[in-house]
Image (cartoon, rainbow, N blue to C red):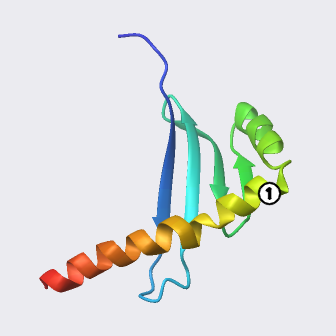
Amino acid sequence: ADGFYEYTMFECVYSTSDYSDMVFLASLSFNKVVDAQFNSTVGKFVGYTEEGVMYAKNLNKDQADLEQWKAQVDAFCIPNAQLSDSAVRDKT
């Protein structure tokens, strides 16, 4: 079927057991192409396509919103990583 597919994907990436290197990523995609992405380490949205550059420019205007996005490392990533890691450790 013909149509369009727009979606946002949230990821938490880390490699240390103390989560000190935790990075929160939010990717804005359209038809499997990532247009823009927020990276908590960078602290802002970065555009990868012509549309994505415009999205990023608009999304980066509000400092309060960017602070909320950055806070997702502590609010979303670390608690879920702790749950997931403990479930794996308890089973080994």
- Quadrant where the N terminus sits is top left
Query: Where residue 60 appears, x then y in whole percent?
Result: 81, 50
The secondary element bearing badge 1 is classed as helix
Please identify the quarter of the rendering in which residue 89 is found: bottom left
Residue 32 lies left or right of residue 49; in this view the side is left
Please identify the quarter of the rendering in which residue 48 is found: top right
Label 1: few (<14), some or many (≥20) within 10 Å?
few
Q: Is residue 32 above or below residue 36?
A: above
Query: Where residue 61 appears, x then y in whole percent?
Result: 86, 48
Residue tagged 1: 64
- Quadrant where the C terminus sits is bottom left
Please state which of residues 83 and 55 is positioned toward the viewer in this rendering: 83
* Residue at screen point 67% across, 65% down: 70
The amino acid on which the numbered mark 1 sits, given as a three-letter code, is: Ala
Please identify the quarter of the rendering in which residue 69 is found: bottom right
* Residue at screen point 69% across, 60% down: 68
Q: Is residue 67 above or below residue 55?
A: below
